Image: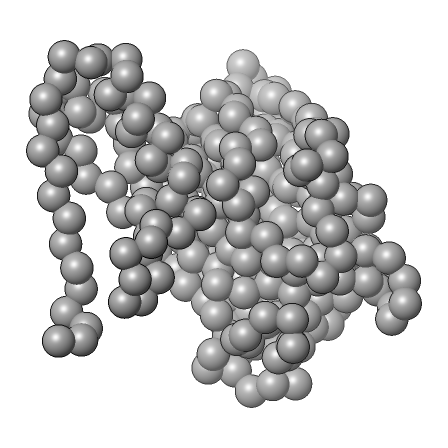
């Protein structure tokens, strides 16, 4: 794990100690779901970002839980934007709709549709600007519901999952020269927690076929239970796909528990 934040060390009502903002936010508890949550509200050109820069390898995962909320009681969902990008200004917000040299933003509109934009602001051949959305009703987010967002980066490739569903798969979305190092929340209203950045697996098929083994940390269980959690689906599907492609390969599966309990 490279970075983890559940705001458990912060007092309810305070802005979290390890974050920065040009707007406002506060740590709250909610009767919707347990734990501490960072509450953010809409304000023009305002954002909340990680105070320290992230040191990300070529392969990593970014996961978080988010609850879309309304800007005012009785109103509909306000939507939100999540941005992962290359920071230029250490203490202030990098402005503009496509800040800095490179970035990826994921947004949920006020009517629930998930969208993305991936960009590299460079004049040379690496320059890109791509965007898209998923308009299927089953993927639209709803007010006051919790969603687990997982972003999986492998060199230039980026996959994004909402709960167990893969929504976007972009083979050339990540810059090879401007590594992302900042996580930012902006442009909407919601509650966010359980933000986790971890070293990710390289290409599974290549690892298995060339090295004869594959180690993954992407399969999760609840404490003291043998039921696989929904966010494990992406990893399990990827492994199943490999085994179906090479049916002659023989595998041994090894798993380890932690040291808690008897």
Image quadrant assignment for residue 233: top left
Please, which colouring scheme is shown? Answer: one colour
Q: Is residue 62 above or below residue 118?
A: below
Observer-nearest of 85 and 76 = 76
Point out the image quarter for the N terminus. bottom left
| Residue in view at x 43 percent, y 57 percent | 196
In the depicted view, which residue is nearer to us: 62 or 114? Answer: 114
In the picture, measured across the screen, residue 130 lies left or right of residue 5, that is right
Residue, x 33% and y 35% (percent of image)? 236
241 lies above or below 10 = above
Residue 203 point in image, percent of width and height: 30, 26
Residue extending furthest toward the front: 226
Location of the C terminus (image quadrant): bottom left
Residue that lies at the very extreme toward the right in this rendered image? 74
The answer, for residue 166, to whether it is visible in the render is yes
Q: Position of residue 219 (x, y in %)?
A: 31, 47
Q: Residue at x 72, y 41 (%)?
A: 140
Whether residue 147 sits left or right of residue 151 in the image: it is: right
Q: Position of residue 260 (x, y in %)?
A: 19, 73
Specify whether residue 47 is in view: no
Q: Position of residue 32 (x, y in %)?
A: 65, 71
Q: Which of the 4 image quarters holds residue 241? A: top left
């Amino acid at each position: 794990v490279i970075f983890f934040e559940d705001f458990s060390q912060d007092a309810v009502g305070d802005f979290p100690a390890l974050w920065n903002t040009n707007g406002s936010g506060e740590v709250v508890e909610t009767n919707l779901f347990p734990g501490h949550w960072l509450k953010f509200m809409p304000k023009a050109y305002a954002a909340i970002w990680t105070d320290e820069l992230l040191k990300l390898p070529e392969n990593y995962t970014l996961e978080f839980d988010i609850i879309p909320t309304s800007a005012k009681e009785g109103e509909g969902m306000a939507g939100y934007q999540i941005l992962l990008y290359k920071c230029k200004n250490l203490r202030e917000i990098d402005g503009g709709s496509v800040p800095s040299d490179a970035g990826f933003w994921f947004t949920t509109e006020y009517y629930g549709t998930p969208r993305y934009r991936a960009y590299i602001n460079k004049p040379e051949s690496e320059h890109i600007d791509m965007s898209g959305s998923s308009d299927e009703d089953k993927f639209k987010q709803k007010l006051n519901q919790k969603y687990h967002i997982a972003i999986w980066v492998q060199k230039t490739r980026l996959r994004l999952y909402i709960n167990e569903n893969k929504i976007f798969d972009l083979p050339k979305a990540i810059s090879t020269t401007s590594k992302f190092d900042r996580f930012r929340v902006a442009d909407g209203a919601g509650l966010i927690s359980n933000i986790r950045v971890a070293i990710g697996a390289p290409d599974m098929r290549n690892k298995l076929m060339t090295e004869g083994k594959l180690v993954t940390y992407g399969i999760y269980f609840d404490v003291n239970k043998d039921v696989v959690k929904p966010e494990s689906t992406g990893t399990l599907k990827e492994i199943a796909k490999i085994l179906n492609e090479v049916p002659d390969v023989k595998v041994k599966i090894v798993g380890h528990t932690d040291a808690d309990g008897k």
